[in-house]
Image: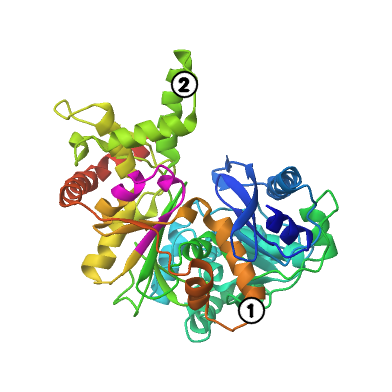
Amino acid sequence: MLDAKQTIASGRAVLGIEFGSTRIKAVLIDGQNKPIAQGSHEWENQLVDGLWTYSIDRIWYGLQDSYADLRRNVLAQYGCEIENLAAIGISAMMHGYMAFGRDEKLLVPFRTWRNTNTGAAAAELSRLFNYNIPLRWSISHLYQCILEDCPHVKDITYITTLAGYIHWRLTGRKVLGVGDASGMLPIDPQTKTYNAAMVEKFNALVAPKGYDWKLEDILPQSLCAGEEAGCLSEHGAQRLDISGHLKAGCPMCPPEGDAGTGMVATNAVKQRTGNVSAGTSSFSMIVLEKDLSKPNEMIDMVTTPDASPVAMVHCNNCTSDINAWVKLFKEYQELLGVPVDMNEIYGKLYNHALEGDADCGGILSYNYVSGEPVAGLADGRPMVVRSANDRFNLANFMRSNLYATVAVLKLGNDVLFNEEHVKVDRITGHGGLFKTPGVGQKVLAAALNSPISVMETAGEGGAWGIALLAAYAVNNKDGLSLADYLDKVVFAGNTGTEIMPSAQDVEGFNRYIETYKEGLAMQHTAVLAKKC
């Protein structure tokens, strides 16, 4: 504790802040890259005029509240103020659309990764570029606005992601980490910036509109991990710490997306390594040895924070629906007058699921709170489906809901492993699904038919990952690559606890997923019926 207090008091601590879908988390780390203090703020997106968004006021209040919570915790734990920091990193949900005009004000409400209204734009751009362009990417949102003749498009001077926006307001620099930038527009692995040929094709495509901007002029500058990305300004310090104690001037690393910070937090930036992040949404990231043979709409090509190519399977839905079911059991427990401990409820239900049949007794769960592009759904309807002959009990019900959290992830990764024959030596899991020891890990191992590792730091998540990137930017005196820095300095050989898939679980999950795929027609029908 004394060492941590000295680290904070002397201004040697590093701060990482990540905007997740349901929580904004701030983490301070010491010189050994260990977390020494945390703060957080809970929030939720809103569906406004048919689009998922967070308001600007909520974004800034959430940032300030998470930092204020960190500050309170530091005062309570160490009895000192945070006045200086060695470095800061900002991370956030990837993709989405934030468009600004000449007055530097937002032209339309922030559109998050969760929106699936960009189908026409994504399809046309995928054909134009001969490259899979996902619905949630910034370029899809921009072109969809062009297709719809949205009046704000002519006034655009800058577009960025949430992480890029916060970094810009704190430093004055319009930059973005290459991993997050790869979710705006494809990256050329040679130049480590936006693909020039695609930029040229896009400009030609929209030229008839007569806009007075070019695509290259409105995108943030793409930077690799470790590159200089500006410093916290006076105005930025005041906006971050409303108590006024934090001083300006500390360096800030390139802002990154949550996919990039997840790779860093699980030491998965080398070729043939991968990670799975499983929370509100889920995604797997496999660092490739070579390009895929062809574009596939289930596979997004992005990059590590140091610009290595990554095959990403992104699923809009993961734990939101199972969390809703757990809350239902909580209500029942409260109705009986039994004291509620949410950790105990999760632990009991998750572990009980392992007692269910390997194929869930025939019960199917679709956790689509929102649309699911990998499954071909622009909208979603959470459903539990069973026949009269299925083995309907609590263990099978919970196991089916756990399977649902990774079912769509399996659909995409089956393409990588079975069709593209991608090889991976280690997959590491992190995020809320893995908080109950062993359960989510075992389910994912069965789904991917691969050993899954989870580290003790799995719960630290992306806020720790972006703090590590900030530390790398200022502490990498030996000029190590990001992969070597993580291997030698941060993790020092720690690969976590590994669970191997059992043959019975793999066979059961495969039976489940075949029925699951056949049942997707019910989802399409439910979406149509709801609209009637």
Question: Residue 252: which numbered mark, if any?
Answer: none
What residue lies at 63% left-to-right and 81% top-to-bottom?
A: 477
Q: Nearer the viewer, residue 33 or 343?
A: 33
Q: Is residue 491 magenta?
A: no
Q: Which residues are magenta?
A: 427-443
Quadrant for the C terminus in the image: top left
Q: Position of residue 442 (x, y in %)?
A: 29, 48
Query: The disc labelled 2 sits on which kind of residue?
Result: Glu
What residue lies at 64% left-to-right and 54% top-to-bottom?
A: 36
Circle 2 is placed at which residue position? 331
Q: Nearer the viewer, residue 439 or 421?
A: 439
What residue lies at 48% left-to-right and 31% top-to-bottom?
A: 342
Query: The disc labelled 1 sits on which kind of residue?
Result: Glu
Q: Position of residue 138 (x, y in %)?
A: 55, 63
Q: Position of residue 52 (x, y in %)?
A: 55, 46
What residue lies at 33% left-to-right and 54% top-to-bottom?
A: 409
Q: Secondary structure at mark 1?
A: loop
Left or right: 237 with respect to 311? right
Q: Residues within 10 Å of mark 2 (few under 14, many from 20)?
A: some
Q: Residues within 10 Å of mark 1 (few under 14, many from 20)?
A: some
Q: Nearer the viewer, residue 497 or 118?
A: 497
Location of residue 497 by image quarter: bottom left
Q: Position of residue 361 (x, y in %)?
A: 18, 34
Which residue extends farthest left?
Answer: 389
**Observer able to see residue 250:** yes
Left or right: 149 with respect to 376? right
Question: Residue 227: which numbered mark, if any?
Answer: 1
